[in-house]
Image (cartoon, rainbow, N blue to C red):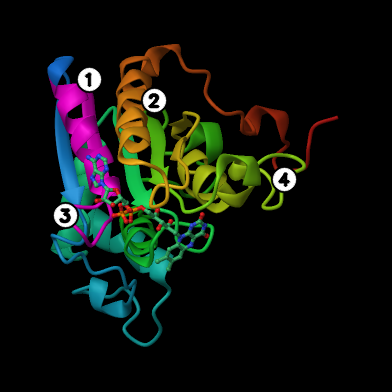
Amino acid sequence: MKVLIVHAHYEPQSFTTALKDQAVATLSAAGHEVRVSDLYAMQFNPVASAADFAERSDPDYCVYALEQRKGFESGTIAADIREEVAKVDWCDVLILNFPIFWFSVPAIMKGWIDRVFVSGRFYGGKRFYDQGGMRGKRALLSFTLGGREHMFGPQAIHGELETMLRPILRGSLAYAGFTVLPPFAAYHVPYVTQESRQQILVEYAGRLNRLDDLTSLSFPSLDDFDDRLYPKT
Ligand SMILES: Cc1cc2nc3c(=O)[nH]c(=O)nc-3n(C[C@H](O)[C@H](O)[C@H](O)COP(=O)(O)OP(=O)(O)OC[C@H]3O[C@@H](n4cnc5c(N)ncnc54)[C@H](O)[C@@H]3O)c2cc1C
């Protein structure tokens, strides 16, 4: 199995980085090939802009998704985007590893999705959800939070974790066709004991060794919708 870990933390000694290192060690030991995109270390540019296109199909007005599609097809899209798309193409499993910022991913990771999930390859026309360009690949979120576990759930103060992360789980990964595995959450990380954090690393290794046993999250199938994307009755 080929695994791409996209990692977003500014501090190499952080616990989030320890989760990334645990994944590299565990997956490599199990015989899998692992590559890492360490976004802060790479100084990845997260800002989607007209500068991503060396040649424009319309020089007067930039429609980002349209230029993405054309620039990707012609090979004129920015080199850093091409390199990241090639890594995602290479992998069987994509892991996004990050600390929760404001109920979401840090800006650098959001920008990685904005720029790398290119129209034409990841989605386009009626190619999304189970028809998306990444169908056949799996995706996993692994993340740290300040919040405690009991703060997330149907009746909990912040609501369900999967609802909080809907823009990533559904709007990005499932939309692009990935089979989305249940996320791995490391709760209350800065406030628990060192031993508790070490236990989280052990639990994460266990999760990674059981990827094939996990039941993926459910998302729509285009088969259940008509040509205009109304639900079939
Ligand atoms: C802008 C912003 C927005 C945020 N929004 C939210 C939010 O919406 N919801 C929420 O819940 N939280 C939120 N947070 C909190 C944030 O998610 C947590 O602070 C973060 O996830 C903690 O992870 P870390 O890797 O940064 O921890 P660190 O502070 O880097 O690490 C915690 C401790 O783990 C230790 N450690 C490192 N490696 C190991 C190891 N191998 N074994 C054991 N211990 C180790 C470190 O030394 C440190 O003492 C937000 C924070 C910011 C800055």
Q: Cβ(mark 1) to ligand 1 < 8 Å?
A: no
Dot label at residue 12: 3
Amino acid type, mark 4? Ala
- Helix, strand or loop status at disc 3: loop
The image quarter containing residue 47 is bottom left
- The foreground one among 16 and 90 is 16
Q: Is residue 45 above or below residue 95?
A: below
Amino acid type, mark 1? Met
Given this view, does label 4 or label 2 mark the residue nearer the observer? 4
Given this view, does label 4 or label 1 mark the residue nearer the observer? 4
- Helix, strand or loop status at disc 2: loop
- Helix, strand or loop status at disc 1: loop
Given this view, does label 1 or label 2 mark the residue nearer the observer? 1
The image quarter containing residue 29 is top left
From the image, tell me which residue sits under label 1: 1
The image quarter containing residue 57 is bottom left
Mark 1 vs 3: CB contact within 8 A:
no
Amino acid type, mark 3? Pro
Q: Quadrant of the C terminus?
A: top right
Q: Quadrant of the N terminus?
A: top left
- In magenta, the rendered stretch is 1-28
Give the residue at the far top of this rendering.
213
